[in-house]
Image: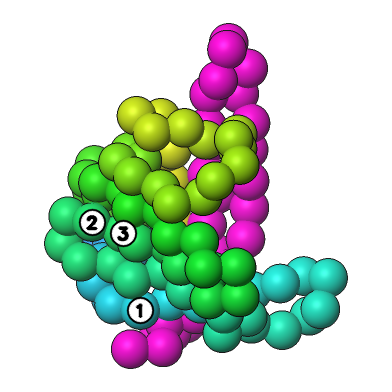
Amino acid sequence: MIKPSLILIVIFVLSQGFHVANFQNCNRFKVGNFIYFQQDKNTYNKNLLAVRTTDQQINIDKEKGDTLVYDLTWTTPCHYQLILKSSNVKSVGLIQVGDTINVSLQPVNRRIFTYQSTFEKSGESMHFEGKMRKVK
């Protein structure tokens, strides 16, 4: 007969192993070039690029010529913050220089992850979800 305490220990060890593996998967997405999935077209858009280094993310829309530069800080292995530092977008958008976006990601496989981002403005919280693929 297996003791209940032994079962709990095994469950705990296995669950910790899953968390460690999940964090290692997130580490794959800390640096590189990524493209965004467009749900309306059901495909990845090679013209919407995110170039990520250890401390910066640059979002580029190749069709429009828009470039947004963010400072990037990882708060946990699968969560990071983006602070908009500069933008060449001429029209006033929702996100302004100095604004912060909180992002969490969940690996799908070695090249793809889903993300959920939260942005607060004027006391309102906005949530965005999407999927990205690592291309380099």
Provide the residue span drawn in magenta. 108-136
Q: How far apart are marks 3 and 2 (CA)?
A: 4 Å
Residue type at the position of mark 2: Gln
Q: Which residue is drawn at 63% across and 80% down?
A: 45
Q: Is mark 1 on a helix, strand or loop?
A: strand
Which residue of the protein is positioned furthest toward the right in this rendering? 40
Mark 3 belongs to which amino acid?
A: Gln
Question: Would you call the spot at circle 1 few (<14 residues within 10 Å), some (14-19), or many (20 or more)?
Answer: some
**Residues at marks 1 and 3 touching, judged by CB atoms closer than 8 Å:** no
Quick check: 96 above or below 115?
above
The image position of residue 49, as x and y in percent, is 47, 74
2 or 1: tag closer to the N-terminus? 1
Q: Looking at the image, which residue is at 59% across and 35% down?
A: 92
Q: Is residue 124 visible?
A: yes
State yes or no: residue 125 in magenta.
yes
Q: Is residue 39 above or below residue 87?
A: below
Residue at 25% x, 49% y is 72
- Secondary structure beneath dot 2 equals strand
Please provide percent x and percent y for residue 114.
55, 64
The residue identified by callout 2 is 56
75 up-or-down from 77: above or below: above
Looking at the rendered structure, the kind of residue marked 1 is Asn
Q: Is residue 136 left or right of residue 108?
A: left
Residue position marked by numbered label 1 in the rendering: 33
